[in-house]
Amino acid sequence: MKTIGLIGGIASGKSAVAAALAELGAVVLDADSAAREAIATPEACRLLVERWGPEALDHAGQPRRGAIAARVFAPTPEATVERRWLESILHPRIRERFVAEIARLRDVGAPAVVVDAPLLVEAGWQTLCDELVWIECPESLRRQRAATRGWPPGEFERREAVQMPIDEKRLLANWTVDSSGALADLPQRVRQFWAERIERSGLPPGKSACSQ
């Protein structure tokens, strides 16, 4: 079994590539979903209130995610401190969950696992991965896609600023999938990666991907 990490800029198409890999049999571990669960645990909520006061939670005792995002992604030194504090709470919990799930999936014989995480490299989770796939997409198109998310003005810039620079991150990958074309063409590009790096690597010695 191989673990695949997806890296790219904001709105580059990582989730679409993850979905295409899932269609081929991979199991997707979604960091955003894991973070939502981690921040809503009683322990995390207690820490939020200790740090930011009761207004960090809504009337149901759940984190006010929009307010928290505004606090930690603001373009100020204080926001950077708060974001790093929040990451220090969430990232170890998410990593622990990923490690356990990868081990479980290996035991049951899953062909591949995909780690879909916006801050995969920044959090150090690339060490969990056998393959790093770069999702190539020009900034102009990424901005168009991000505009459909309903973010306030400047949110794209704020979020991209907290990530490793694009040019540095691209160098870490050992495969590139171009997502700048029609989304209908994306599965074919993903299948090429799957055939070369997943199926072929799992063949017995002396066999090829075309062997019958």
Image (spheres, rainbow, N blue to C red):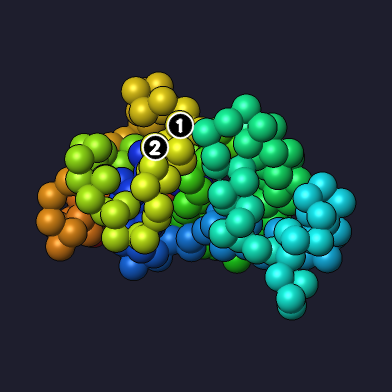
Helix, strand, or loop for circle 2?
helix
Q: Amino acid at mark 2?
A: Glu
Helix, strand, or loop for circle 1?
helix
Where is residue 189? Give x, y as percent. 20, 50
For image coordinates 75% across by 61% down, the residue present is 55
For image coordinates 63% across by 32% down, the residue present is 80
Where is residue 5? Give x, y as percent. 46, 44
Looking at the image, residue 212 sits to the left or right of residue 93; the answer is left
Determine which of the numbered discs, if any, sits on residue 157 in the image. Answer: 2
* Image quadrant where one finds the C terminus: bottom left
Determine which of the numbered discs, if any, sits on residue 21 in the image. Answer: none
Where is residue 103? Give x, y as percent. 66, 54
Looking at the image, residue 50 sits to the left or right of residue 116; the answer is right
Looking at the image, residue 186 sits to the left or right of residue 88; the answer is left
Residue with the mark numbered 1: 161
Q: Nearer the viewer, residue 166 or 5?
A: 166
- Do the CB atoms of the residues marked 2 and 1 lie less than 8 Å apart? yes
Q: Nearer the viewer, residue 15 or 72?
A: 72
Q: Amino acid at mark 1?
A: Ala
- Location of residue 127 (image quadrant): top right
Q: Nearer the viewer, residue 88 or 157?
A: 157
Give the distance between the C-alpha atoms of the residues marked 2 and 1, in whole angstroms: 6 Å
